[in-house]
Image (cartoon, rainbow, N blue to C red):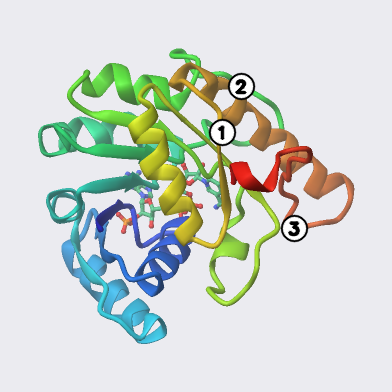
Amino acid sequence: MKIGIIGGTGREGKGIALRWARAGHDVTIGSRDGERGRQKASELSQTAARPIAGGSNTDAVAAGEVVLLSVPYGAHASTLTGLAEGLSGKILIDITVPLKPPKVRRVQLPDGQAAALEAQALLGDTVHVAAALHHVSSALLADPDREIACDVLVCADKKTVRDTVIELIGDLGLRGLTADSLANAVALESLTPVLLQLNKAYGAGEVGVRFTGIPESSE
Ligand SMILES: NC(=O)c1ccc[n+]([C@@H]2O[C@H](COP(=O)([O-])OP(=O)(O)OC[C@H]3O[C@@H](n4cnc5c(N)ncnc54)[C@H](OP(=O)(O)O)[C@@H]3O)[C@@H](O)[C@H]2O)c1
């Protein structure tokens, strides 16, 4: 599949790009600075042993059938506003956690209740917004050979969109599970500050979530 990553030069985006490229997808990483995007893509391509393309965020949106958004919450609305037209008709996977520094270990719901709901409201119905990957640390994703014992809850209003995203999560080496409609992104995004709190409380760096009781045949 052709996948574009907005903010693909960052901590989370780079690991995701690497893992999807290794799974055989055609990945384009984007940046505010097209040259920076190309440079990072060239570095990642060597590790992936497969070409990863790079350019501006507009280039990444244009290249992807599915587009993943990976920028800090502070840049969420402004980034999407500039890219809205190109996203029409596509799936947008929003991994944003609406953290408000410096209190990143405290749940602080944004005005629209969830970043993914704000994205859907901003972009309109022609863009199929999904929410996922809020609980997987960039440190874990960065090493493509590392197994990650973490589940990924996926929200989207259409089942076909959830199914596509869950399959792509599988290609990252993770188990994707349906968490139903995009309204449930409030719960997903809210859990991350709690995980950050657990990291601090137990001196860990990579606390994640794993659900029990789900039959293997459902995975
Ligand atoms: N890090 C994690 O472990 C983790 C885990 C789960 C979810 N997330 C979520 O994933 C998203 C990305 O996290 P990250 O840690 O990868 O962030 P990051 O490395 O700080 O930033 C990602 C990219 O966003 C772009 N960016 C930074 N500031 C920007 C601005 N003001 N306007 C537009 N673009 C900007 C930068 O790309 P250019 O400078 O190249 O444009 C940067 O490489 C966040 O929403 C975060 O909540 C992160």
Relative image position of residue 76 (x, y in whole percent): 36, 34
Ligand 1 closer than 8 Å to label 3 CB: no
User: Residue placed at 18% from the left, 48% from the top?
Assistant: 61
Ligand 1 closer than 8 Å to label 1 CB: yes
- Between residue 208 and residue 31, name the one nearer to us: 208
**Image: 151 above or below 139:** above
Identify the residue position indicated by label 3 in the image. 205
Tag shown at residue 28: none
User: Residue placed at 18% from the left, 69% from the top?
Assistant: 35
Chain-order first, disc 2 or disc 1: 1
Identify the residue position indicated by label 1 in the image. 99
Q: What kind of element bears circle 1?
A: loop
Q: Is residue 200 visible?
A: yes
**Image: 84 above or below 36:** above
Crowd around label 2: few <14 · some 14–19 · many ≥20 (10 Å): some
Relative image position of residue 199 (x, y in whole percent): 79, 49
Residues marked 2 and 1 touching at CB (< 8 Å): yes
User: Residue placed at 22% from the left, 28% from the top?
Assistant: 127
